[in-house]
Image (cartoon, helix red, strand yellow):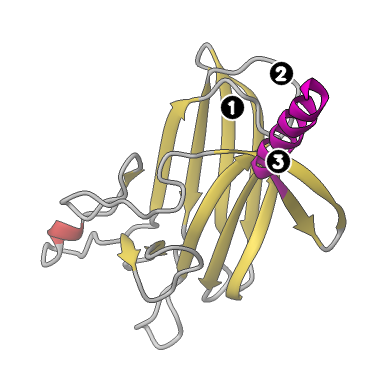
């Protein structure tokens, strides 16, 4: 009876452990299993009364529409979504490049930032996501991704993070949209970001 109980317990623990593991795929790399580390509101499902993504600092101001220039450059989008109900849309408003930053406490050192992006880029333009891991307010590891070409469908990106340090206490993620307009002088560079997570 004790042996059966131990086998059952072992099976349950194994199943529980497997639920934490997620396959990370990249066509250029072998598939690896990694443990997910949540990013606060990394899926952009939560927005406050000012229509800003909760936990994120942005240069968007949805309630400023009608000002000298429209500062609504980071917005909630329910039409173009990879996962859940909303994604974050970064648009160039002819004056400001859109950006969003999140800084939060983190002691588990991630090795990858995974997310899903889609974009329309006009003229030569660049969109980017950067990661900084800090210890005692000093950057100890980092990661960076950029694209200079349009991404017409939501595409998974896996951003490697350096692992020089063993101890961290804070993570900082910065997303930057583009800064160009289309030849028709109406459309502008747009970036959608959804379902961000760290993995170790």
Left or right: residue 81 versus residue 5 is left
Quarter of the rendering occupied by the N terminus: top right
| Disc 2 to disc 3: CB gap under 8 Å | no
Q: Secondary structure at mark 3?
A: helix
Q: Residue at x 15, y 65 (%)?
A: 65
Q: Which residue is mark 2?
A: 165
Residue range (magenta): 1-22
Q: Residues within 10 Å of mark 2 (few under 14, many from 20)?
A: few
Query: Of 140 and 53, which appears nearest the observer?
Result: 53
Q: Which residue is mark 3?
A: 15
Query: Of 21 and 15, which appears nearest the observer?
Result: 15
Q: Is residue 103 magenta?
A: no
| Disc 2 to disc 1: CB gap under 8 Å | yes
- In the drawing, what numbered circle is on residue 81? none
Cα distance between the residues tagged 2 and 3: 31 Å
Q: Residue at x 32, y 67 (%)?
A: 93
């Amino acid at each position: 009876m004790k042996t059966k109980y131990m086998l059952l317990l072992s099976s349950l623990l194994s199943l529980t452990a497997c639920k934490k593991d997620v396959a990370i795929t990249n066509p250029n790399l072998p598939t690896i299993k990694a443990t997910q580390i949540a990013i606060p509101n990394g899926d952009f499902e939560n927005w406050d009364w000012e229509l800003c993504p909760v936990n994120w600092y942005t240069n968007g101001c949805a309630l400023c529409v009608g000002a000298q220039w429209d500062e609504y450059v980071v917005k909630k989008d329910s039409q173009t979504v990879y996962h859940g109900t909303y994604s974050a849309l970064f648009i160039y408003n002819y004056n400001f490049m859109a950006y969003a930053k999140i800084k939060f406490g983190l002691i588990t050192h991630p090795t990858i930032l995974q997310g899903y992006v889609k974009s329309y880029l006009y003229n030569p333009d660049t969109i980017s996501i950067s990661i900084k891991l800090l210890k005692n307010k000093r950057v100890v590891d980092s990661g960076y991704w950029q694209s200079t070409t349009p991404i017409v469908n939501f595409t998974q990106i896996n951003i490697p993070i350096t692992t020089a340090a063993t101890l961290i206490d804070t993570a900082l993620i910065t997303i930057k949209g583009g800064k160009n307009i289309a030849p028709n002088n109406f459309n502008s560079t747009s970036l959608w970001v959804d379902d961000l997570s760290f993995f170790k």
